[in-house]
Structures are given as structure tokens and as C-alpha cells.
Amino acid sequence: MILGLTGAIGGGKSTALSAFAAAGAETYDADRLCHEFYRDPDSELVRKLAARWGERIFSATGAVDRGRIGAIVFADQTELNFLTGLIYPELERRMTAAIAAARRRPEHTTVWEIPLLFELGWERSFDAVAVVWTDPALRRARLRARGLPDEEILRREARQWPAERKLEHADYALINNGSEAYLRMQCVELLKKLNRKV
């Protein structure tokens, strides 16, 4: 089984992915893969970013500063479109290759955490999709506790489907209104169910 995992910002997707991994699933984090694209300062991607935005995207050590890129793209939809136009095709290529490899190893369930899974139309690549859902007020309170101001939360939410819409399109729901232990227990039970379907 190849499971797509998604949900709204601050909903607990990373915690759920960690729970799946601890329970024995092979896991992938799309955001982490995207971050890896920036690591090689001589890569074609980094050269294109520098050509567009100049030296301001680099830290004092010469590494790409994702925070500086975020400040650029989240303030301007045109710049965001430019960035995603570079990153998403490469991410999809890697995802497709990894899923093909996983299908040749059917003994494991594979879980991919992809925040914009539905928005990108990638749900068709998966056997099923699980959404982590959290009450919006609780989710935003958690984001504020991480230091995100309300304006930034709203800006990021605007790029995503509403949480309820994601839930309507999902095959499975993981409810994250309680403790972390409760969310992890749901992930373990879902993994058992998926493994029985293999």
C-alpha cells in the first residue's frame, strides 16, 4: 500500500509521519526532500534562484537561507509561482520513481507526507489518502506557539484547500484534537489496517 498523508498547516502531519515510521512504515517527507534541493550551491536550481533573486538568498556562510526565500515568495504570488515551477516537477519526478520502487517491494506500506497533495492533483499516485484534521482554533493556537503571526498563518492557509475539503476527499481521517499519544495510536491502527490489505 502507498499512502498519501496530508492536512492543513499545523495539523500534526509530521507527528503522524513519525508515528507511521515508528510502527514500521517506509516514510517520505516532501518538504524535507524540497529542502535538500537547496543544499548544493552549484546545482542548477540554486543557480536559477540566484539569477532571479541575487545574493540576498544566501546566508553569511554561503548556504541558501530558506527563511529569506520564504520572505520573498510568501509576499509575492508571482515569485511563489516561479519557485514552485522549479521545485514541484523535480519533486514529482523523485516521488514517482520512489513509488515505482516501493511497488516492487510490496512487503512494506509506504507513507508520503505531502502538504499540497490534493492541490497538486497528486492523489492519483496513491492507493489511499489520509488527512490529519485538527480543530482550526487549536491548530492556529499551536502555530502561534511556534512563533507564526496570524497574518502569516492566514497567508499560508490561503495557498491550501480548507481542512474540511481535504477531509471530504480523504479515504481515512486522523483526528488530532487530543494528545500526541492519541494521534500516534490512530496511526498504528491505520497502518495495521493497510497492511492487512497488502
Image: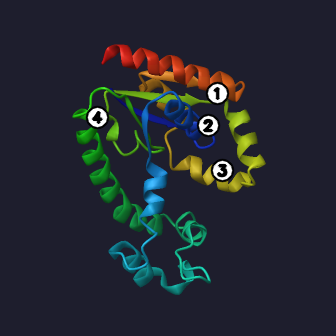
> How far from the left and from the top, in percent, is residue 142?
73, 41
Q: Quadrant of the C terminus?
A: top left
Q: Could you give the CA–CA distance between mark 1 and mark 2, rounded to whole angstroms?
A: 7 Å
Q: Is residue 107 left or right of residue 139?
A: left
Which residue bears the numbered disc 3?
153
User: Which comes before the other along the chain, label 1 or label 2?
Assistant: 2
| Cα–Cα gap, marks 3 and 1 | 18 Å
Look at 73% across and 34% down and name the residue there: 138
Across and down, in percent, residue 97 comes to: 25, 47
Residue ID for mark 4: 124
User: Which mark identifies residue 176?
Assistant: 1
Foreground of the two, 49 or 32: 32
Q: Residues within 10 Å of mark 2 (few under 14, many from 20)?
A: many
Q: Is residue 117 above or below residue 188?
A: below
Labels 4 and 2: the sequence-earlier one: 2
At label 1, counting other C-alpha atoms closer than 10 Å, the crowd grade (few under 14, some 14-19, many 20 or more) is: many
Disc 2 residue type? Gly
Disc 4 marks a residue whose amino acid type is: Arg
Distance between the alpha carbons at the discs numbered 4 and 2: 23 Å
The secondary structure type at the circle numbered 1 is loop
**Residue sitting at x 32%, y 47%:** 95
Q: Secondary structure at mark 2?
A: loop
